[in-house]
Amino acid sequence: MLSENILNFNQNLSLPDDELPGNFGFMNPFQDDPHGQINRITETFYRKYYNDNQPRKILLGINPGRHGAGVTGIPFTDTERLENVCGIDPGGFSTYEPSSVFVYAVIDAFGGPETFYSSFYVNSLSPLGYTTVNKKGNTVNANYYDDKQLQEAVEPFMIAKLQEQISWGLDTDVCYCLGKGKHFAYFNKLNKKHRFFDKVVPLEHPRYVVQYKWKKRDEYILKYLKLLKGEGI
């Protein structure tokens, strides 16, 4: 079952600290689970929505953040969406991820999580997220492309993990890239070299819509829906 492939994949994710530049660390909720809930949450989620072998198209974000997949283990899903939309009790902790708000608005417009997840598999080009320390001494999110040394250090990891996921029988006709700037430019170049997918379709990153275009969110939801349904590709 696809669910078991995903769960095994998550449990075996690893990236040694010494592979990263000195200012960066990484998040692995599957191995560092302070709430003791991640295995239960992810097993429930993936066996609920992916307990079959039908092919799905892929949506790829950048890398998990500290309030979404970096904590829940499920891409673009915070505890509020997990509980109130997916019907899965997160247990004794709570997170709020702005990107999750938009993604689940798209999912709702598509027909709900059962319909959406039966057609799409969601992850990030880097399935592990990164952190760094800012000038104020605070730990903050980092994207793989924020630093050239970080990008070069994790590129082999990202390539290998994407190839592993594709090997499950996922649909490689098209990949939806969540992010139109540096993320798309990098991934599109990588795809041309390795030919993971026949076509990469860029979409505005959910965080961008929430932060800068929220008043026009309905327009972006419609754009997502049209492209996800293959219109205009």
Image: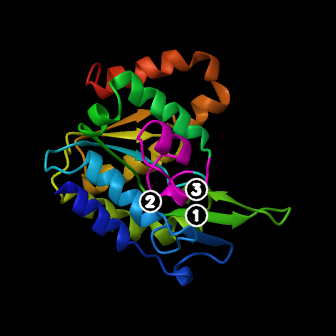
Q: Give the range drawn in magenta.
A: 68-95
Q: Which of marks 1 and 3 is in front?
A: 1
Rounded to the nearest angstrom, the CA distance separating label 1 from label 2 is: 9 Å
Q: What residue type is labelled 1?
A: Tyr
Task: Give the structural element (helix, strand or loop) at label 3.
Answer: loop
Q: Which residue is drawn at 39% across and 46% down?
A: 60
**What is the quadrant of residue 26 in the picture?**
bottom right
* Sequence-first tag of 2 and 3: 2
Q: Does residue 136 appear left or right of residue 159 in this picture?
A: right
Disc nearer the start of the sequence (1/3): 1
Give coordinates of residue 132: x percent, y percent: 68, 66
Q: Is 126 above or below relative to 197?
A: below
**Secondary structure under badge 2?**
loop
Magenta-drawn stretch contains 71? yes
Label 2, residues with CA under 10 Å away: few <14, some 14-19, many ≥20: many
Query: What label sits on residue 130 in the rendered view?
Result: 1
Residue receiving disc 2: 126
For the residue carrying disc 1, how many other residues have a C-alpha within 10 Å: few (<14), some (14-19), or many (20+)? Answer: many
The residue at 79%/63% (across/down) is 138
Pointer 1 with pointer 3, Cβ within 8 A: yes
Give the dominant element type of the magenta stretch: helix, strand or loop: loop
- Give the residue pinned by disc 3: 143
Where the C terminus falls, by quadrant?
top left
Residue 212: x percent and y percent?
A: 66, 28
Residue 179: in sight, yes or no?
A: no
